[in-house]
Image (cartoon, helix red, strand yellow):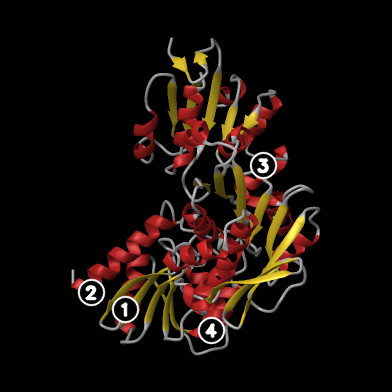
Amino acid sequence: MGRGANGPRSQGRRATVMGLGLFDGGVSVTRHLVEAGHDVVVTDLKDEAALARSVARVRGPHVTLRLGRHETADFTDTDLVVVGPAVKPGNPFVAAARAAGVPLDTEIGLFFRACRGRVTGITGTAGKSTTSALLHRILEAAPGRTALLGGNIGRSLLRDLPDITPETDVVLELSSFQLHWLRAEGLRQDVAVITNLTPNHLDWHGDMASYRADKAAIVPGAGGILIACADDPGARGIAAGAACHVVWTARDGEPAGDALWWEGGVLRARKGDHALDVLRREDVRLLGGHALWNVASAAAAALVRGVPAAIIRGAVREFTGLPHRLRPLGETAGVLAVDDSKSTTPEATALALDSFERPVRLLAGGYDKGVDAAPLVAAAARRAAQVVCFGATRDALATALRAARGTVRVDVAPTLPEAVRIALAAASSGDVLLLSPGHASWDQFDNYEERGRVFADTVRAVHSGS
């Protein structure tokens, strides 16, 4: 028999991992369980060819692959089921495990329970990845500190558990899916950030009330601190009911109480009777006015964690953002291509459109998550010179845009590459070609990263004449 991380492998210690996926979570949890002494069944509805990259990382002794299907026995005749975060509530296989009395867990739950570090959890409908990455960058820049970044942003920290001490700063981006499972267990961190709350993933949560309740699971207990955007009604509503201390952030006006707010191009902070200037607008290199909310949230969390303002200011000056989040790809023939593939909600696209004064040729559409596209439609009618609708929602989106008041040109394309070609054919020097879909990518792509890569590759191909 092999040996696990906790000594000799125990007889009859079995686990099922539901959802291998193409990101890091399924791979890391499988390895974690094997090292802890489990014999693991990995099951996923995608077949081996679709999951080849992940399969290669878990294949080995004590791992059985059940791909392209689920089998009920794997959920009822086992000692533990670890559920992937995207598995919907009410899944029949999860229900079968629960009925059989099999304990359920998640990758993020396993990490939370074992983590000894200082965890800051960050969520929101938009902005959580940028806020998480910026906070991590600030904490890394602070002398004498060690910081780790994980969660929904793509990297599981299970492998780092042995090296995490009570002095380690851990920044976790937490999705509504992950929070749904953490909510059931009552697992919380002592510092949390909620950037905003608008309708999203209603096909998964069922309704806005359930989505809100899952997002609210990030709120710390009575001894913790919640950082919330006072400008956003959804975040403000969650924070208003919090038992913990609240630090407010704002771009539009000065909130009461402890807060960080933008005033005349300066980010100011107040704690009790003490106030200080943290940084200036010119220190921020990110596109879009909405980036100021993310910077304020990250700065607030850093101050709460004891980082001096000078360190925050220096880290913000060096931070240029994340891939696929309003990331400029360069200009060709005077047309600036911008990759905002991470925009998966109508509200995110509306914010992206307001980031430019130049004429915008918008590429929008994709998988239908059951949310109202009205914010995208209204912003496009007001700000875009052209919208090329692609993907599964293209016809419905085009119909809504044509019915809206405004002079926006509306075109329809079955695929993203064709949408790029239509938009570039109409573009003039000085225009912005903006991929900001306002929808998930799952109709035609594995994820938003692949969608962004296809966009960049197509732009290059069109400009090179290939």
Q: Which tag, 1 or 3, sits closer to the chain's start?
A: 3
Q: Position of residue 92 (x, y in %)?
A: 63, 35
Give the quarter of the image for residue 113: top right
Front position in the image: 234 or 399? 234
Which amino acid lies under the numbered mark 2 shown in the image of this protein? His
Residues under labels 1 and 4: Cα distance? 19 Å
Residues under labels 4 and 2: Cα distance? 28 Å
Q: Which tag, 4 or 2, sits closer to the chain's start?
A: 4
Residues under labels 2 and 1: Cα distance? 9 Å
Q: Position of residue 98 (x, y in %)?
A: 68, 29
Residues under labels 2 and 3: Cα distance? 47 Å
In front of the other: label 2 or label 3?
A: 3
Residues under labels 1 and 3: Cα distance? 45 Å
Q: Can you say whether 386 is above or below 113 in the image?
A: below
Judged from the image, the secondary structure of the residue bearing numbered disc 2 is helix
Front position in the image: 192 or 408? 192
Q: Which residue is mark 4?
A: 381
Q: Which residue is mark 1?
A: 424
